[in-house]
C-alpha cells in the first residue's frame, strides 16, 4: 500500500463510510451507528480499513483520513436529522488525533458546518490511551465540554482499573471478551470486572461483537445498555441502513 495511493483515495473521494447499527439492550431499538471507513479502490474493489489505516498512521496521513471520516459522518448525520431520523454517529479517533491541536480546531469548524455535537460520539482505544506516556486527558475533557460524548473503545481484561483515569461516557467491551464469555469462565469474569468499573463511574456499557442469540441473552443480565455485532447487523451503506431501519421499526 503506497502513500500516494492512499492520499489520492482521500483527495479523489475513493473512500466511503459504512454504518453499523448500535441497539439498546434489551429492546433492540436502534440508538445510533458507528461510522466505519472503506476504500473503493479502482482496481482492487473494497479494501478493508485493516489494510490501510495502519499505513495512514505510519505515514502521517491519519489526520487527513480522520478529517474526511469526521466530515462525512457529520454530514450524513445531518441528513438523517433533517429527515426526522436522528441517530448518534460514533467516529474512531487515534491518540495522534487527540494530541493534534489542528484536529481540535477542525472538530469545532466541522460541527459549525455539519451539525451540532449532540449526535457525535468520539471513540478512542482504551489500550492506546493507557500506553500513552502523556495521555490527552485535556482533549477528552474538551470534547465533553462541547457536548460530544466520549467512548473508551475495545476495553479488555487489562482495562477495568484504568477506566477511572479518563473522562468518558461510554465503555465498549472488546469483541474478544464478548465472543469468548459464553465458553470461557475467565473471559466472563473479566467482562464483569469491566462492567463493575463502568458502573462505579456511571458509564454506559456497550457489547461489541455480538454474533449469536446465546450471547445476546446474557447482555441485560450482565448490565449492558447497548450492543452491536453481526447478530444485529453488519456495517452497511446509508441507503441499506434506511431499509434495515424501516424493517426493524
Image: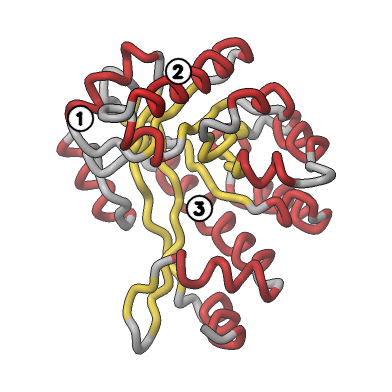
The residue positioned 54% from the left and 66% from the top of the image is 53
Q: Which residue is mark 2?
A: 192
Element under disc 1: loop
- Give the left or right position of residue 65, taking residue 212 as reference: right
Is residue 245 something that shows in the picture? no
Mark sitting earlier along the chain (3/2)? 3
The residue positioned 80% from the left and 58% from the top of the image is 102
Q: What x and y, as percent, mark residue 74?
A: 54, 50
Query: Which quadrant is the C terminus positioned in?
Result: top left
**Scheme of image coloration:** secondary structure
**Along the line of sight, the residue nearer the viewer: 35 or 109:** 35
Q: Within 10 Å of the Cα at label 3, are there few (<14), some (14-19), or many (20+) other Cα atoms?
A: many
Mark sitting earlier along the chain (1/3)? 3
Element under disc 2: helix
Proximity of marks 1 and 3: CB atoms separated by less than 8 Å: no
- Whole-angstrom CA distance, mark 3 to mark 2, is 32 Å
- Whole-angstrom CA distance, mark 1 to mark 2, is 31 Å
Is residue 238 something that shows in the picture? yes
- Compared to 64, does 188 lie above or below? above
Q: What x and y, as percent, mark residue 202?
A: 59, 13
> Which label number is shown at residue 249?
1
Q: Quadrant of residue 218?
A: top left
Q: Within 10 Å of the Cα at label 2, are there few (<14), some (14-19), or many (20+) other Cα atoms?
A: some
Element under disc 3: helix
The residue positioned 45% from the left and 38% from the top of the image is 174
Q: Which residue is mark 3?
A: 73
Amino acid at each position: 500500500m503506497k502513500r500516494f495511493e492512499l492520499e489520492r483515495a482521500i483527495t479523489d473521494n475513493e473512500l466511503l463510510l459504512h454504518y453499523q447499527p448500535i441497539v439498546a439492550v434489551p429492546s433492540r431499538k436502534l440508538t445510533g451507528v458507528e461510522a466505519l471507513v472503506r476504500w473503493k479502490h479502482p482496481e482492487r474493489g473494497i479494501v478493508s480499513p485493516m489494510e490501510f489505516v495502519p499505513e495512514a498512521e505510519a505515514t502521517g496521513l491519519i489526520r487527513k483520513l480522520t478529517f474526511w471520516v469526521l466530515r462525512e459522518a457529520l454530514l450524513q448525520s445531518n441528513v438523517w436529522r433533517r429527515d426526522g431520523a436522528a441517530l448518534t454517529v460514533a467516529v474512531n479517533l487515534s491518540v495522534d488525533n487527540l494530541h493534534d491541536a489542528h484536529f481540535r480546531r477542525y472538530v469545532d469548524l466541522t460541527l459549525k458546518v455539519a451539525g451540532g455535537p449532540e449526535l457525535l460520539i468520539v471513540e478512542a482505544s482504551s489500550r492506546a490511551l493507557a500506553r500513552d506516556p502523556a495521555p490527552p486527558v485535556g482533549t477528552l475533557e474538551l470534547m465533553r465540554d462541547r457536548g460530544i460524548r466520549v467512548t473508551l473503545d475495545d476495553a479488555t481484561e487489562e482495562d477495568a482499573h484504568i477506566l477511572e483515569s479518563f473522562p468518558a461516557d461510554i465503555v465498549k467491551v472488546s469483541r474478544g471478551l464478548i465472543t469468548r464469555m459464553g465458553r470461557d469462565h475467565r473471559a466472563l469474569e473479566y467482562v464483569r470486572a469491566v462492567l463493575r468499573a463502568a458502573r462505579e463511574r456511571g458509564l454506559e456499557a456497550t457489547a461489541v461483537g455480538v454474533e449469536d442469540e446465546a450471547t445476546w441473552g446474557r447482555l441485560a443480565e450482565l448490565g449492558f445498555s447497548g450492543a452491536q455485532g453481526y447478530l444485529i447487523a453488519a456495517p452497511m451503506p446509508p441507503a441499506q441502513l434506511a431499509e434495515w431501519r424501516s424493517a426493524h421499526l
